[in-house]
Amino acid sequence: MTTIAPSPPRTRGLGQFLFRRRRAVLVSALLLTLVAGFFGAGALNAFVLSRFEAPGSESIVTKAELADEFAVGPANFLLLVTAADGDVDSAASAAEGEAIAKALEDTGLAIAIRSYWDDASPTLRSDDGSQALITANLPGDVTHVRENVLPELKAEFTRTEGAVAVAVGGSDELFREAAQLAREDFLLAEAIVIPGLLVLLIAIYRRAAAAFLTVGVGLFALVLSLGVMRIVAAFTEVSTFAANLILVMAIGLAVDYCLFIVNRYREEAALHGRAEAVARTVATAGRTVVFSAVTVAASLSVLLFMPFPFLRSFGYAGIVVPLAAVLGAAVVLPAALAVWGHRVERRKAPKPLEEGRWHRLATRVMGRPVLYGTLALALVAVLASPLLGVRFGVPDERALPEDAASRVVTDQVTANFAAEETDTILILVEGADAESLSAYAAAVSEVDGIIQVDSAAGSFIAGEEAGPGDPERFQWNGQDTWLAAVPTGDAMRDDPYAMVGEVRAVAAPFEVSVSGYPADLADFRDALLDRLPLLLALIVLVTFVILFLMTGSVIAPIKATILNALSLSVMFGALVWVFQEGNLAGLIGFTPQGSFEPSIPILMFCIAYGLSMDYEVFMLSRIKEEYDRTGDRVGSIAAGLQRSAPLVTAAALVLAFTFAVYATGDVVFLQMLGLGMALAVVVDATVIRGVLLPAIMRLTGRVNWWAPAPLRRLHARIGLREG
């Protein structure tokens, strides 16, 4: 004899409270939205820009020492000067060039200014002699530099007429323009996503009232998330790019959760009065979406263990956004249903479970689980196969559209100059004499990828002295000084990490430490990879515990982890095929780089893992509910799939739409996030959960809900179940 488990008293009591106090809850939600809107209105201005830096690394510590002792730093700013007469050595061009360098010095905003017309360095002159560079370091806080200093300098020095034309570039200008384009993409996405979702939801619900309530909850979650993140930004760094994730996840998750709440309410309203339907909905689907939100938040919270403000920003957002979404879906929406539930209920009764297409699919798959499971795995393997050729590299100007001003400048420097002067490696030297300094500089110049080394003891190319030393520029006091090792453009594009490693490996009879943009990137990557095993272990462990608490099984979390890995492999395979190999580049509008900057895939892994587990929670909760009610190991899978899969598919469609909007943006990082996540949620909700999940559960049979006796007893005491 089977029994129906009673609804958990606490969540049932919450549903009853929300029904009784529905108007007070809705008024409170409105006031909270207004307060959050007041704080959130300035959120984008409170967010900051970040560099690819690892705090405490050799490159960062050395950079600070160079700035303190010698007032030098990486050349993060440049002026590309083009002679109107085609010759930067002509009298007119030289006079203008010297005047521009003097004007830059007079601003007081730049240090370590180098001009071709000051020292005639060949690395500052284009191959054809028509262009030359003025480079400098803009010291100070990255956000202040990019938001205040760079716009001022760009306005003052950009010119297209006269003896020379001047254009502004450099690494900080590239990232400043990328951040500006990301903000524009945010506003454009906001204008597209909300009305687009409304139309989509009306088609899904077939009731306009349900669609408007769901979008309203999405806006509540978005405004609340921005308001809270504005407060977070007052205490720690929050990256500008986090705003893009906040928009897509706040709207997407809130809509996902509302789909499950509304559907469960419709089921309960067909059997009970409105008060009872609201109470049962909160006790069942409400508990499930809380589990889901905790799972997503846990998956993204592991980013807080990464030692980089850029990634930690997404960790903060990954905690705030799911909690805001679940507050709207599990508290505000039930109160709204208590008032307007009659406008949400179905006009006609749904078909019996056995007639549903997902029930029929699950039954067919479980009839031949090996065949269907093998076919699904083969499809996944084909889609994931490009992942075998993945390459990791450095971010460069190709992340921006071809017509972006800073990219145009960088493209010209790359094409017309033999060296990447702004990517110079700076080497701090302590305790050197003239002979040993000269020998060391010559040895560094022999490193593959280094075109020239300048020092107080001389300039060296391929181990041979190519010019006299410059003790004044390098401020040599007989012991301490610094060197400048200039890389080629090919070295920066091919493998700058190896180049930095070889420079650091050059033996020196004195103390040396390495800094500069290439060293920043190398140290950032090394620190990232050092923390990666911890990140992977934490995300698997946390989600394992959450699924165990929900199901009481140790097998279900293991299967979920395997299915998530398959889903993620498809996403990364597609990213390699599209963005690394360049397929669809013309359609989407980007320039393939042939590699990935590693922090973006790690971010996408955490997001996709959380969302995949999100769908696992929804499906397993209904399957487990059916199993607890009937004890039927096979029938519960088909019934649970029929009750959850249509909603998971609809939720995936909604989330895919919100992510896909960014695939039309201008910044490659956001295009990757948009396309990759859209594909991941669609494949996960269909092939992975629709075919592989029932096939595996059928094959594992009675062990699906197994746990060792001690863990069963533990779950009986602390486990959390849907009623």
Image: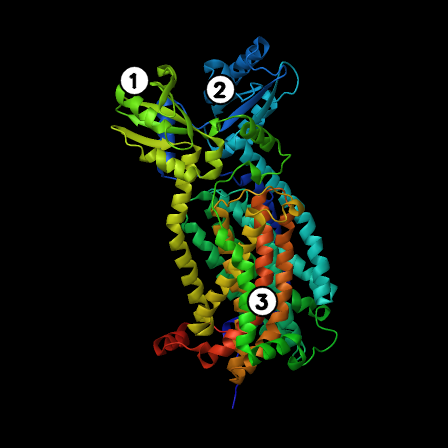
Q: Which mark is residue 327?
A: none
- In this rendered view, identify the residue nearer to me: 123 or 464: 464
Q: Position of residue 689 (x, y in %)?
A: 56, 69
Q: Residue furthest top?
A: 91
SS category of the residue bearing label 2: loop
The chosen color scheme is rainbow
Q: Position of residue 554 (x, y in %)?
A: 41, 72
- Mark 3 / mark 2, whichever is N-terminal: 2
At 51% from the left and 81% from the top, the residue drawn is: 628
- Mark 3 / mark 1, whichever is N-terminal: 1
- Mark 2 / mark 1, whichever is N-terminal: 2
Name the residue type under label 1: Asn
Contact between labelled residues 1 and 3, with CB atoms less than 8 Å apart? no
* Residue 662, placed above or below residue 504: below
Q: Is residue 100 left or right of residue 658?
A: left
Q: Which mark is residue 687?
A: 3
Residue underneath mark 1 = 477
